[in-house]
């Protein structure tokens, strides 16, 4: 088995966000990778320009998924669920989807379909640059309140401005229709309320809950590792 991690919005250096869980998986002989998302500026194309939207994120993740025939679990976090819905569709190697505090779109839905039309208070939007991002001063209290001091200190360096166009671009597939899926509800999440997560989770094949904030793979990596290792593949 291998694991492909798809990170959330407004961050870069995806491997850092997953590193604690990835290290524990490696100890068990399970390899993992976190694809770079163009919309977050991870591939050299400036966010907010053409060639750095959802279709490019989907293509980047899909390429990684197609690179191996090894049975694969895709772990999608937050915005990563939008990308994964399309990227994982129709790829035989993908045996399970683990959705962590994740958006879970139907065909034709976009990220903007799940909001009220206004930016969340922890985000800042630069319409001239065509980007949005997390307000650094609100990062810890909103997303990392249950993480240790080391994570809280290091995380701001891994934030990124992201192309705002991804919020309105719809997905053309919904992989969770055909691939077994598990939704992990993070009950103490201050970024994506648990009530919203539970609504998305109704679309998944199975649901588990954890008393954790938005990033349980950093705050409780052993728990997430064990969940991954016990998923049916």
Image (cartoon, grey):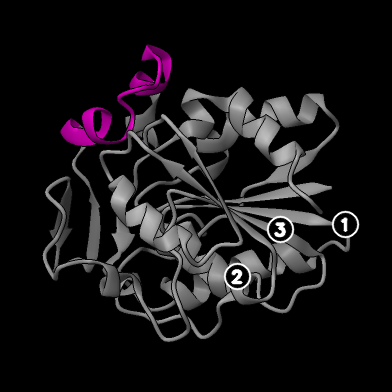
Q: CB of mark 1 within 8 Å of CB of mark 3?
A: no
Left or right: 80 as drawn, with respect to 222 = left
In the image, residue 93 sits, relative to residue 7, either above or below, namely: below
Using a 10 Å C-alpha cutoff, classify the residue at mark 2 as few (fewer than 14 neighbours), some (14 to 19) or many (20 or more): many
Q: Are marks 3 and 2 in contact (CB under 8 Å)?
A: no
Image position of 169 (left or right of 64): left
Q: From the viewer's perspective, is residue 138 above or below residue 39?
A: above
The residue at 69%/63% (across/down) is 180
Q: Position of residue 53 (x, y in %)?
A: 41, 73
Identify the mark nearer the N-term, 2 or 1.
1
Q: Which residue is mark 3?
A: 96
Q: Residue at x 31, y 35 (%)?
A: 143
Q: Which is nearer the eye, 15 or 189?
A: 189
Inspect this view and state whether residue 2 appears.
Answer: yes
Name the mark nearer the viewer: 2 or 1: 2
Magenta-drawn stretch contains 135: no
Q: Nearer the viewer, residue 116 or 133?
A: 116
**Residue sitting at 56 percent across and 66 percent down?**
84
Image: magenta residue range: 137-153
Q: Position of residue 106 (x, y in %)?
A: 46, 78
Q: Is residue 140 magenta?
A: yes
Count of number-bearing discs? 3
Q: Secondary structure at mark 3?
A: strand
Q: Quadrant of residue 175?
A: bottom right
Which residue in the protein does label 1 denote?
Answer: 70
Measured Cα–Cα span from mark 3 to mark 2: 9 Å
């Amino acid at each position: 088995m291998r694991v492909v991690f798809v990170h959330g919005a407004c961050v870069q250096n995806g491997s850092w966000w997953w590193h604690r869980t990835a290290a524990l998986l490696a100890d068990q002989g399970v390899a993992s990778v976190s694809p770079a998302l163009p919309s977050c500026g991870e591939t050299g194309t400036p966010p907010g320009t053409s060639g750095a939207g959802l279709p490019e994120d989907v293509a980047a993740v899909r390429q990684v998924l197609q690179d191996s025939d090894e049975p694969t679990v895709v772990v999608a976090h937050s915005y990563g669920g939008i990308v994964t819905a399309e990227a994982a569709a129709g790829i035989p190697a993908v045996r399970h989807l683990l959705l962590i505090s994740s958006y879970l779109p139907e065909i034709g839905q976009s990220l903007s379909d799940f909001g009220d039309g206004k930016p969340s208070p922890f985000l800042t939007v630069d319409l001239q640059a065509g980007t949005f991002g997390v307000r650094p001063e609100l990062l810890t209290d909103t997303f990392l309140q249950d993480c240790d001091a080391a994570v809280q200190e290091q995380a701001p360096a891994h934030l990124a401005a992201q192309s705002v166009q991804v919020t309105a671009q719809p997905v053309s597939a919904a992989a969770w229709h055909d691939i077994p899926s598990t939704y992990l509800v993070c009950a103490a999440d201050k970024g994506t309320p648990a009530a919203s997560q539970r609504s998305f989770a109704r679309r998944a094949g199975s649901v588990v809950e954890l008393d954790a904030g938005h990033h349980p793979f950093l705050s409780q990596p052993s728990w997430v590792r064990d969940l991954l290792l016990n998923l049916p593949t």
